[in-house]
Image (cartoon, rainbow, N blue to C red):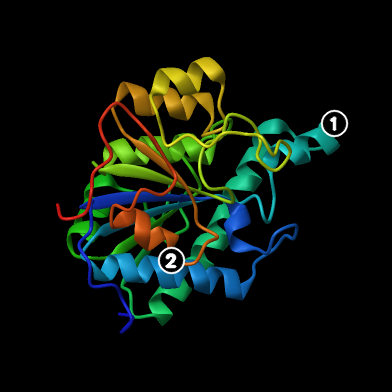
Amino acid sequence: MDPNAPTGKAAFRRILLKLSGESFCRPGEGGISVEEVSRIARQISRIAALGVEVGVVVGGGNILRGAQLISRGADVIKEATAHYMGMTATVINGLALQDALESMGCETRLMTTIHMNEIAEPFIRRRALSHLSKGRIIVLSTGTGSPFVTTDTAAALRGKELGVDVLMKATRVDGVYSADPEKNPHAVLYESLNYDQVLRDELKVMDMTAIGMCMENRLPILVFNFKKEGNIERVVCGEPIGTWVGSATRPRAGL
């Protein structure tokens, strides 16, 4: 593990971190940036060193977005096919993150919902829980394995299945705003929200299906800016960063 790992106490026992495909590349670019992957892996390795059980759901938009492909070539590539192509893109990101984590001494397992036995394990809930209990980081690719379902919804589903304490949504902004802060300088940052507010005001947290699933299962969501170095560690240690979405009060460090 990283010798510079934090020594504080974590506020959560088990988390699920949702990383978009854009997490793997520089802003405005596509593909995979080794520097960006290493930066994310370094922070994940540090929270694992605190004893936190970590699952990571990865997107694939830096490589291919099914929705964009559909809009450009609907008469050539079927919609379901485009979604499957997007799912395979998440595996490329998952492989990159797995190797980056292992280069830092973290025992890691890449799991997929589409069988790719030569490069990843199939997602089996009991096996995933076993890995977590042994301190292994699990990287979850290919979403739910079905088309027409986002990786946000997959994260909400896996969060419930794996019994995590919180679903952490990594974004490029500091949390949930009343409007797009990149377009509206007067947008207000929310410290906390309940699910009803998110649904009523159609706030850009996650897709509405994912929000509804989290609400039904009382799974809190923490939206934060992962681009600021050390923020992943800070939110895990209970610092009041980002926006807490849920009915319960945000936990503090020391659990």
- Mark 1 element type: loop
Q: Which of pointers 2 and 1 indicates the residue nearer the eye?
A: 2
The three-letter code of the residue at mark 2 reads: Gly
Residue 108 position (above or below residue 209): below
Determine whether, in the image, residue 54 is placed left or right of residue 120.
Answer: left
What residue appears at the point 30 percent right and 50 percent down from the top-left corner?
15
Which one is in front, 20 or 248?
248
Give the residue pinned by disc 1.
75
Determine whether, in the image, residue 205 is placed left or right of residue 5.
Answer: right
Please say whether residue 38 is visible from this viewpoint: yes
Which one is in front, 248 or 126?
248
Determine whether, in the image, residue 51 is placed left or right of residue 230.
Answer: left
Mark on residue 95? Answer: none
Please say whether residue 110 is visible from this viewpoint: no
- Residue 109 is drawn in which quadrant? bottom left
The disc, 2 or 1, on the residue closer to the chain's N-terminal end is 1
